[in-house]
Amino acid sequence: MDFSRVIAVRTNKTVYRDGDKAIKVFDKGYSKADILNEALNQARIEETGLDIPKILEVTTVEGQWAIVTEYITGKTMERLMQENPDKKDEYLDMFVDLQIKVHSMKAPLLNRLRDKMNRKISQADLDATTRYDLHTRLEAMPQHYKVCHGDFNPSNIIIREDGTPFILDWSHATQGNASADVARTYLLFCLKGDQETGEKYLNLFCRKSDTAKQYVQKWMPIVAASQSVKSKPEEREFLLSWVNVVDYD
């Protein structure tokens, strides 16, 4: 394998390009279970027929685990939005349609979103009363089994040269309530300091999917609490602020 061309550097992992392959190499000490779960998630999503890079191999490179997938030639939607600000609304429209398509899929063997969120709320840096309230609210939410990406944002969409969008990074994929996935995407826009686009996105998604905006907003404290667990300190402060302003029933 050729590791001379770095295409992305993330926390605890580096992605290289080797011809028509992308090689994601994880730092030593990264959880083997999480790596194998990511590969399994991606294999299960492949079976839905969505356009995603196919898994080719799970291996080790000098003692470090690596996932090898197809390399998709193109630009991220995030980059296209930056390069073509006049087309940003057009890309946002495509972005929402793509997420709705993801939510229309079923993958019965994926981990359940509700289980993951309950576990993370238990780990959150919150007092027992707040955690109890969040667990109670989560259990009261309707239980669905839709495919949820878990990190759906424009940097995880590659637009191929023929215009076909491919969705990357299925490490957080679960099955559950689509509105939780939407709340997560909204918070990701806000974390990047782009609340204006976040609001546009939320309004557009709710209109296209015929979802009440208030329903998605009910998920935000739950999602923010669960996402705060492994976040950076500055992100954690922002996410927990969403928890603290919640109006509990």
Image (cartoon, helix red, strand yellow):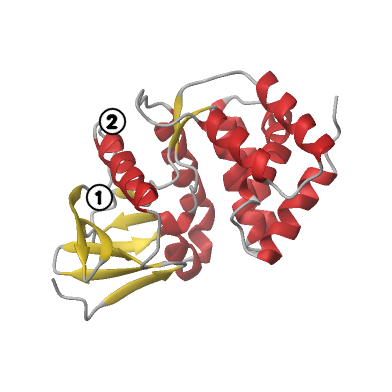
Amino acid type at mark 1: Pro
Residue found 69% across the figure and 46% down from its top = 124
Can residue 223 be seen in the rendering of this structure? no
Q: Horizontally, is 209 left or right of 174 in the view?
A: right
* Residue 35 position within the rendered picture, expressed as x and y whole percent measured from the top left: 34, 51
Residue found 25% across the figure and 39% down from its top = 43
| Residue neighbourhood size for the residue with mark 1, other residues' Cα within 10 Å, grouped as few (<14), some (14–19), many (≥20) | many
* Residue 233 position within the rendered picture, expressed as x and y whole percent measured from the top left: 68, 65
Residue found 44% across the figure and 45% down from its top = 94
Q: Nearer the viewer, residue 80 or 70?
A: 70
Do callouts 2 and 1 mark residues in contact (Cβ within 8 Å)? no
| Residue bearing mark 1 | 53
Q: Which mark is residue 203?
A: none
| Residue neighbourhood size for the residue with mark 2, other residues' Cα within 10 Å, grouped as few (<14), some (14–19), many (≥20) | some
Sequence-wise, the earlier of marks 2 and 1 is 2
- Label 2, label 1: how far apart the Cα atoms are: 13 Å
| Residue bearing mark 2 | 48
Q: Nearer the viewer, residue 177 or 232?
A: 232
Q: Horizontally, is 30 left or right of 90 in the view?
A: left
Quarter occupied by the N terminus = bottom left
Amino acid type at mark 2: Thr
Q: Nearer the viewer, residue 200 or 42?
A: 42
Q: Horizontally, is 36 left or right of 245 in the view?
A: left
* Residue 52 position within the rendered picture, expressed as x and y whole percent measured from the top left: 28, 46
* Residue 249 position within the rendered picture, expressed as x and y whole percent measured from the top left: 85, 24
Say which element carries label 2. loop
Can residue 190 be seen in the rendering of this structure? yes
Q: Nearer the viewer, residue 11 or 141?
A: 11
Say which element carries label 1. loop
On the image, which quarter does residue 217 sit in?
A: top right
On the image, which quarter does residue 104 sit in?
A: top left
